[in-house]
Structures are given as structure tokens and as C-alpha cells.
Image: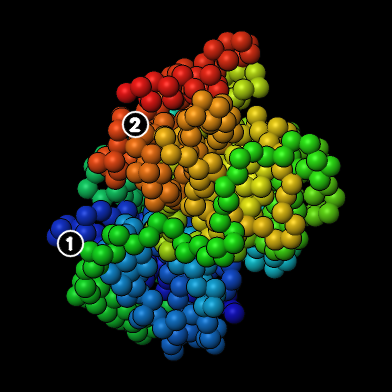
Amino acid sequence: MTTHVGALRRYTFMKLARDLDSRFESLLLTGRISKWYSEVGNEATTVAAGLALEPGDALCSLHRDLGAILAVYLDPARAFPGFGFGESDGLRPEPEQILHRLACQLLGKAEGFSQGIERSFHYAHLAPEMGIQHIGMISHLGSMIPVAAGCAFALKQSGSDRVAINFIGDGGTSTGDFHEGLNMAAVWKLPLVLVIENNRYAFSTPVEQQYAARHLSDRGLGYGIPAHRVDGNDPQEVSAVVEAAVARARQGAGPTLIEAVLGRMRGHSEGDDSLKVVPPKELAGYQAGDPVPAYGLWLEEQGILDEETKGRLHGRIRDLVETAISGALDAPQPQVATAHRPVFAPAPEWPKSHQPESRQSEPKADPAVSTYVEAIHRALSEEMERDEAVVLMGQDIGVFEGAFRVTRGLYQRWPHRVLDTPIAESGTLGIAAGAALLGYRPVVEMQFADFVSCGFNQLVNVAAKMYYRWQLPCPLVVRLPSGGGVGAGPFHSQNPEAWFAHVAGLKVVCPSTAVDALGLLKAAIRDPNPVLFFEHKFLYRRAKAVLPSGEHLAALGRAGVVRPGRDLSLIAYGSSTPLCLEAAEALSQQGVEAEVVDLRTLVPLDRETIVSSARKTGRVLVVHEAQMTGGFGAEIAAVVADEAFPWLDAPVRRLAYPDRPAPFAKNLEQELIPTKDRVLAAIHQLLRF
């Protein structure tokens, strides 16, 4: 494409973005939309960046990136016929069709990309058959940088030369995810271009109160990557720099950081009065340099845009905008049933033979016996052998083979799929989520479950919500060595499963046996949803079993009655299940038969098995090692009280850890942790009621 045609194409998309933006500003003033984030003044940067992408590349956008979205969605030859924009790529949809969906999205209509679930640009549109891979945002600025790096990881891992572009404002560069995502992209040489839209104010905070560096681009040196500072109002300069960065990424040379310096011409959002922080003289300067009319005038001076061409072009833009807006305004509202759409992607249906079986105890001494750790290792090995999309990520899991040696030998077999990460839990989980969106099945090992708190946002606000928001599966497993009883102190003894059981869209699994550790982990890896897999450290080398030969899967969401009984029900999970089995065995010597229910999975929860057991025995004791207040046992008690109350002969009771951290000294920890004697004491109290 000649220089003149390229320049005209840039102006065309800048003008289209500006006109669409202006119409939505008007819709806000008339109350037909509730919120609008304007990109006025950013078009030269966003359009130039979007036009640097090719079909199959990934665009990861924020509020003010409408220009890039249009550049990715629209085939110039089809959207603007007769302007010399070459041949159609034959992939992208009819311009009127996709602009209608975009306008419906922005108006919250049923025909939008998220069917009214998500607001404005908080959506995704993955249509690889059309060459479109667009990932939207969450409100937590900076958080999508690791996700964009994950998209870049998936593109690189697949062997393609596709790249990802991500945008961030100057304010978002102060977040930890900016560092973690960009640092990991640099270390792994991912094909990522990160564009900072620096309009000198984060909401209302000027840059001198945000960072002490001379320029944000100076940070590139610290990551060992190229970085450039450009005039964000000059589409020619932005295009040249972004296109060079994209070419570099395609060649496997890694990421580039680009700081585009812009003028703040609108508030953070329309109507929030945040533009008042910009001094009038400064604002006037930005308005005088408005990139859209300025670029149009330059094209006229260069003889690229004559009056006849300008008239036709502006007319076509006007028609596209009016058709999109009027059609979207008349489009139907979402059906109320949409609010109830599922938070989980449909999971495989496992055969009945893979349901849990009753057991009295695990074998203790047999040459064929495997430990809980060995079962997890076998699950990882089998799933990596079965599916090349399974990749492992975590600190020290490669050559060192993990803190608990769970990944022993796997790096030697699959060095490109067993990836050591920096100490960057949020960055790692975000990369895993981005890779999962593009078809991979990452399994992330937290060295200790406690460390997952550093990546909390990526789980509860990114991965958990993707399917409900976008109807896109996010097959991601996080392995979490958890629990006490081994003298590990306050920061390596926690049981944080209840943190995540509260979050719609996350599955929570807590195996208590080696057999279940094998079957449930394999099922979790094959599940199309994010799964938190809690591995109790006390069980690692104490829980033993002869593992099934051949394929073994244990369905998520099915509890097991692991010891039948008639006098009361003991409901437990994780390390508390063998504890309850020991107590039940002791009770049987006294003529009391306790039924033990192993939940195995907290989310989805097998309410039917819980309620059936409670109705059968009439007495229920819930046992778990996590702290009492807000622990998952409260949910079990509520289910029993709600659905089995007429059958109860006593109140539902809980035995749990007191509401305090775990002390280091073993005698102090034993003073607090549930034990067999404490379980027995609680049982006798319940039986006397």
C-alpha cells in the first residue's frame, strides 16, 4: 500500500472513531446511555496501533481504544469501497453488521457482544474464523496486561508469528500488574506491544504525582526491552514505531514498550467534571492540536484528501454511524433470563463408574501403594501426555521440580511446557488466563496456598467472571498446597478455600485421598472452567493408596459416602475426612455408627448427598480445618438446616479451627487444630442433645 493510501486509511478510521464517539456523547446527554468514556484526542494513537495488526493478532483494549477496535473489526476495502484501500481480506464481516453489534454493546442491548451483561468496552469478541481476537477489560486498570501477555504466550507457544497489542493509561502503569506482566513478557520474549496512552492525568492526578521517572518509556531499560516515546497526536510517527515493534515481535525478539504522549481533552468519563483539573491554558493547547482535524488538514495540504474525496468519505462515515446508532436504539433490550445465564462452561459428563466409592480406610503397607504427592504427579504427567495444550507454570517447578517435588521429571520431558516463573503470582495467573482464552490449559502451582492472595484479583475478577461476561471458557487450574498440622506457622498453614467458594465462576476442589487427588486433578485439568485445587500438605506423604490402573477420573461436584452409618453424619473434606474416619472407627467400638461424607468438591457442591445423609441420621457434625467464622462449614450447616430440618434430632454443629492464625510451635498448633479427640468430644455432645 502506498504512503498516500496508508495515510488516507488512518484518517478514515480516526474520523469514524471521532464521529461515533461524538454520537455517544450526545446519547449520554439525553439519558440514553448511563456512562461514556470518550477517546477524543486519542484517535491518532489507537487507530495507528490497531491498523498495525493483521488477522489473527490479538487486541487487548481499554476504555479509550475505540479507534483500535474499529481498525481490527472493519475490512477497509468493504467498509469504504471506492477509496483505493485494496482488496478485501475475505475474513471480516459486513461493516454494517459488526458496527450494529458494537453499537448494541455500548447501549446494553440484546444484540451486543455481551447481550447486556457487560458495560461499554468491558467485553470480548473472539472470532478467529474472521481473524478477530479482541479481549476487553475489567475495571481494575493494569490487570489486563498479564492477560495480554498470556495471549502473546499462547500465540508464541502455538508456533505462529501472531502478536498481541495492549493499551494502558499513565495511571495504570503504577499498578503491580504493569510490572509483573511486562517483566514476564520480557523474560519469556513474548510477542507483546504495550502502548501507554499518557494523557498526563490519571482520572485527576497529574503525572508528577504518579511517578518520579523522567518518562514512562524510561522503564523499558529496566525490563531489558526497547522503549519509545512518541507524539501520540501524530499518526504517522505512531504508525512507524508501532509497525516496527510489531515486526520485531513477529521475528521472536520479544516485547516493546511505547509511550504515546497525548493531550487530555475529555474527563475520565463524561460528566464527572474531572476535566477541571487541567489548567485552561493547557487545555486550550490540547484542543488546538486536536489530532483528527489536524491530520485531515495535513492530508489536504499534501494533496491526499481533496474536497470531492473528503465529501464522499465523510458521507460514507456519516451513513455508517447513523445506521449503527439508529439500528441499535431500536434493537430489543436483553431478555431478563439472560441475567440467569450460567457462570460455568458446560463440563464433561463422566461415566458412572468414575463416581466415588465407599471406603473404610486406605491401605497402609503395600509395595504398590502410592502417596498423595505421587498421585498428583501421575495426574499431571498423564494429562500432559494426553493433551499438548496442558502447560505448567510456577516458581521453581522446572529443573528444581517444585518445593514438594510434585513436578519431578516433567521438565526433562517437556521443557517448553514446564515453565519456571518469576515471583509474580498475579502476573502468572493473568498470563495463564490469557493463554486459556486462546486454547491452552494452564496448570499453575502456587508454592504455598497462602501466596495466592498476591494474585487474588486475577482469579476473582478476571478468570472467574469470563464465562458469565463473555461466554468464553477459561480452562485454568491453580494447585494450592494448603493446610496445617506440619508446624509451618501463620503463613504456610492456611486453608483459604472459603475465599474462593464465595466467588461465582470458580470451582473449588479439596481431595482427601491419593485416589481422589489423581482423579479429581485430571478432571479439573479437562474442565473448561477455572478450578482451585487445594492439596493438603499434611496428606502429601501420609495419604496412601493403590492407585487404579489405566484411566481414572473423578467427577467434580460429587461427594462420597465413604463410611455408611445410622446414628449421625460427619461431613468433611481434605485432611478432616481421614480424621472423621478415625473417629468413626473409634465410635464403632462403642456401638455408635457414624456416617462419613467426603465432600471432595466444595464448588460445585453435592447438596443431594449432604441432605440425604442428614435425613438418614438426624444429626450432623461438620468438620473442617479452616477457621470457624466464614468457613465453608457454615454453608453446609445452612444447607442442612434449610433442606433437612424436619428430619433433625439436634442442631447442626461445626468443629473447626479457632479464629486465629496458626502458631509455629507444634504443641501450640495442636492446641488449636481439630484432632480425633476433639471430633469425638463434639460427637458425644451432639449425641447427648
State the image coordinates of residue 358 (x, y, percent, origin top left): 57, 47
Front-lying residue, 225 or 331: 331
**Residue 133 in view of the camera:** yes
Res 26 quadrant in image: bottom left
**Residue 145 in view of the camera:** no
Residue at disc 1, secondary structure? loop
Neighbour tally class for label 1: few under 14, some 14-19, many 20 plus, Cα within 10 Å: few
Left or right, 366 with respect to 636, comes to right
Left or right, 237 with respect to 29, comes to right
Vertical placement of residue 454 versus 353, above or below: above
Residue kind at label 1, given as amino acid type: Arg
Question: What residue is disc 2 on?
Answer: 652
State the image coordinates of residue 301 (x, y, percent, origin top left): 44, 72
Front-lying residue, 311 or 200: 200
Q: Residue at x 84, y 42 (%)?
A: 367
Question: What residue is disc 1 on?
Answer: 32
Front-lying residue, 84 or 371: 371
> How many numbered badges does the structure rendering display?
2
Res 332 quadrant in image: bottom left
Q: Residue at x 38, y 76 (%)?
A: 98
